[in-house]
Image: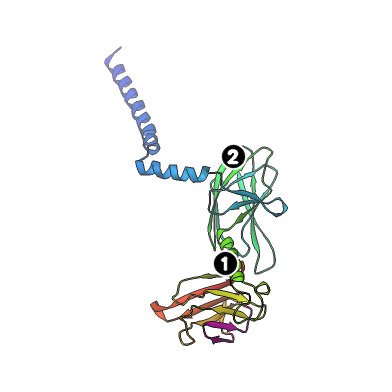
Amino acid sequence: MNVSAISARAVLIASITLLVMTTFVPVALAQSMSANEAKGTNISGQWRGSRGLVTKGADGKVIFLFGEVQPSVVCSPLQVCDIELQAGEVVRDVLVGDTVRWKVEPATSGAAGGQAIHLIVKPSESGLVTSMVVTTSRRTYHIQLKSHARQYMARVGFEYPEDVSAKVSDINARLETGTISGAGLPPEQLNFGYSLSGTASWRPVRVYSDGSKTYIKFPKSVSAQDAPVLFVVSGGQNRVVNYRMKGDMMMVDYNIDRAVLVSGVGWKQQKITIKRGGR
């Protein structure tokens, strides 16, 4: 073999070696993980792989406890999975890992103002696994999607821990006293299904309605002079309605769906938002 042939062979071997190194070294580096990365993926894997609580709802709906684990929804080709979100919840974005073989389409149910969003999920083939992130006006859903040749979950929904807490608070309020101050009615005839959001030194301790009026009970330290101003949210605007203070109780001549309590101005302003039910 002459010198030129040896040189050409050496150049070829060097080129192949360089190609192999540039191809596989970055892959190897990408697959290696630091201690924190390994710990993080392990934590995420435990959350994604945990069984969690699955119960049966109305009409065969599969119910997951929101936030407990990453729910795994099983779908099937030529069938649809209906994932129902909370009534009144507004969807911001739907992000799917595999957008080619998975299709997600929105649908709605219920009356205007309290509609529930449904995500209709359809895989193109079996044996697929991907993830879906749904961001809404209230929370973020992290869902795993799997496709099976024959088995699927026709209806999927969620139980929300805050709803359970609200129900417990309502029951406690009814048991604490035979009649509620201000309304003059027994507790079983009152609606305690209100939620509060925000922080303030005067945050109400209880909100309820008798069907025509709403009663907002403040801490005993709040007087009529210290009480915040009430605005009822209607048509996307804050409107003033008739109300009066009696001790630590604000009595509103209106059956509130959404309202805002405000005190102070600028950076000292405090605000509490009141919502009835899932509205």
Visible residue check, residue 276: no
Residue 18 occupies quadrant: top left
Which residue is denoted by mark 2 in the rendering? 128
Which residue is denoted by mark 1 in the rendering? 169
In the displayed structure, 277 sits above or below 242; it is above
**Magenta region includes residue 49:** no
> Could you give the CA–CA distance between mark 1 and mark 2, rounded to whole angstroms?
43 Å
Q: Which contiguous range is marked in magenta?
A: 241-257
Residue furthest out toward the left: 3
Question: Circle 2 — which element?
Answer: loop
Visible residue check, residue 150: yes
- In this orientation, which residue lies closer to the viewer: 47 or 116? 47
Residue at point 52% right, 85% down?
A: 247
Question: Circle 1 — which element?
Answer: helix
Task: Locate residue 140 relative to residue 267 in the image: left or right.
Answer: right
Name the mark on residue 35: none
- In this orientation, which residue lies closer to the viewer: 133 or 25? 133
Residue at point 36% right, 44% down?
A: 36
- In this orientation, which residue lies closer to the viewer: 264 or 14? 264
**Magenta region includes residue 251:** yes
Residue at point 29% right, 17% down?
A: 6
User: Three-letter amino acid code at disc 2?
Assistant: Leu
- Mark 2 or mark 1, which is nearer the start of the sequence? 2
Could you tell me which quadrant the N terminus lies in?
top left
Residue 223's x, y, as percent?
Answer: 47, 85
User: Three-letter amino acid code at disc 1?
Assistant: Ser
Query: Dot 1, crowdedness within 10 Å: few (<14), some or many (≥20)?
Result: some
Residue at point 39% right, 41% down?
A: 38
Residue 232 occupies quadrant: bottom right
